[in-house]
């Protein structure tokens, strides 16, 4: 039996979690509202906020789980990819705590963690994916179809050549002045809209790859023309615009997923990352899965956007293998799985 403390600080969420083996005991996220007024994450402000949040968030999970630091067996932390200044806060905190408690450190890749979130157990009824499966990882920084052959044996079989799906949501929201992050806002406003009210450009990209920059341009030109005729166009068509943009992004995502699942004959499909929190996306995956005979894995909302529980489960698998990090470990900004 192992108790692992996990830390996630790769972008603008400071999160800590405690896991007993593969079960979460506590998972807490301190969101940084400070970036909203800038319409995007400001790296310098993010690292400063991580410094303020990290001790309270770790204290919070310890008290939620009723554990003391002396009961910890290891500390897992996100090493990258992400914002260097943000990662540094989590890495330094983990090192200091590991050193003070004389327990091992475990480095975790943020993207592997998103995918492995499907192995976090809530109770004995939790069903985890069988290998191999395909995972569509859709976040603010990444959009990839991953062939997952084993816990740490993953290959990218398709990915975006420009913007990530989360960026497509965020940039669309920015064009319409809806605030940041755009994904949750569009998701909410789309509820009352007609998803086929407006048509936007869809990319023609080879293989299992994606592109979202054309969609952004298509939205930009469409709105520019409409606003010339009616300055209130966005305001009066907000719900339909959101629903149509959301539908287009989801269509693009699902088409390639169907292609990959069919050609590779893998009927086990998971989604992960911030965009997998999208309500229409979750419905679309479920419906497509029912139609095509897939077994689908849709993460609990708490494990979609950045969280430390996913870092904890990745850490647990490494703990079992005795894969520990040296005290000299430094964060990295870029690197895929
Ligand atoms: O995984 P995540 O928290 O951070 C990264 O690793 O990037 O993903 C953040 C992204 C943002 O682009 C955000 O707009 C998007 O996930 N997102 C959503 C929703 N919730 C978060 N996109 C669409 N619908 C949502 N409900
Ligand atoms: Zn993420």
Image: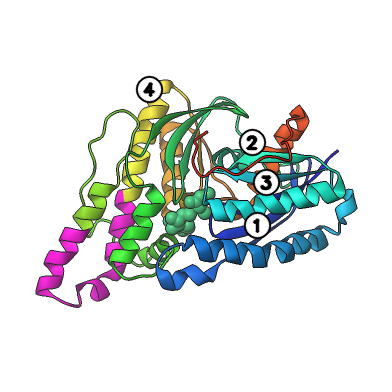
Front label number (3 vs 4): 3
Relative image position of residue 23 (x, y in whole percent): 75, 45
Q: Secondary structure at mark 4?
A: helix
Q: Secondary structure at mark 2?
A: loop
Q: Earlier in the sequence, mark 3 or mark 2?
A: 3
Q: Earlier in the sequence, mark 1 or mark 2?
A: 1
Q: Secondary structure at mark 3?
A: strand
Relative image position of residue 309 (x, y in whole percent): 67, 49
- Quadrant position of residue 197: bottom left
Q: Earlier in the sequence, mark 1 or mark 4?
A: 1
Pointer 3 residue = 77
Q: Residue furthest front?
A: 328
Front label number (1 vs 2): 1
**Is ligand 1 less than 8 Å from the beta carbon at label 4?**
no
Q: Which residues are magenta?
A: 220-248
Residue positioned 42% across, 59% down in the render: 183
Pointer 2 residue = 128
What label does residue 15 carry, if any? Answer: 1
Q: Magenta span: helix, strand or loop, mainly? A: helix
**Is ligand 1 less than 8 Å from the beta carbon at label 1?**
no
Mark 3 nearby-residue class (10 Å; few <14, some 14–19, many ≥20): many
**Residue 193 visible:** no
- C-alpha separation, residue under disc 1 versus residue under disc 2: 23 Å
- C-alpha separation, residue under disc 3 versus residue under disc 2: 23 Å
């Amino acid at each position: 039996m192992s108790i692992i403390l996990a830390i996630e600080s790769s972008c603008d969420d400071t999160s800590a979690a405690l896991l007993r083996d593969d079960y979460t005991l506590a998972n807490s996220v301190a969101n940084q509202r400070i970036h909203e007024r800038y319409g995007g994450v400001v790296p310098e402000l993010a690292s400063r906020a991580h410094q303020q949040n990290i001790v309270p968030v770790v204290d919070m999970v310890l008290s939620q789980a009723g554990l003391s630091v002396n009961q910890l067996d290891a500390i897992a932390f996100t090493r990258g990819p992400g914002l260097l200044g943000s990662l540094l806060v989590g890495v330094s905190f983990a090192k200091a705590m590991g050193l003070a408690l004389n327990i091992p450190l475990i480095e975790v890749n943020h993207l592997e963690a998103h995918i492995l979130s499907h192995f976090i157990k809530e109770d004995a009824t939790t069903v985890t994916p069988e290998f191999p499966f395909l995972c569509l990882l859709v976040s603010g920084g990444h959009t990839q179809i991953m062939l997952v052959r084993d816990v740490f044996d993953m290959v990218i079989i398709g990915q975006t050549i420009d913007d990530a799906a989360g960026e497509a949501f965020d940039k669309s929201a920015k064009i319409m002045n809806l605030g940041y992050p755009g994904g949750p806002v569009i998701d909410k406003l789309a509820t009352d809209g007609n998803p086929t009210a407006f048509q936007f450009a869809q990319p023609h990209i080879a293989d299992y790859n994606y592109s979202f920059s054309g969609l952004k341009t298509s939205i930009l030109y469409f709105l520019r023309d409409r606003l010339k005729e009616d300055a209130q166009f966005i305001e009066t068509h907000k719900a339909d615009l959101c629903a149509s943009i959301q539908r287009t992004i989801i269509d693009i995502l699902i088409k390639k997923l169907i292609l990959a699942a069919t050609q590779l004959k893998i009927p086990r499909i998971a989604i992960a990352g911030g965009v997998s929190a999208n309500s229409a996306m979750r419905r679309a995956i479920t419906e497509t899965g029912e139609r095509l005979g897939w077994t689908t894995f849709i993460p609990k909302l708490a494990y979609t956007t950045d969280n430390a529980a996913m870092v904890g489960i990745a850490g647990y698998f490494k703990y079992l293998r005795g894969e520990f990090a040296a005290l000299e470990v430094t964060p990295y900004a870029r690197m895929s799985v």
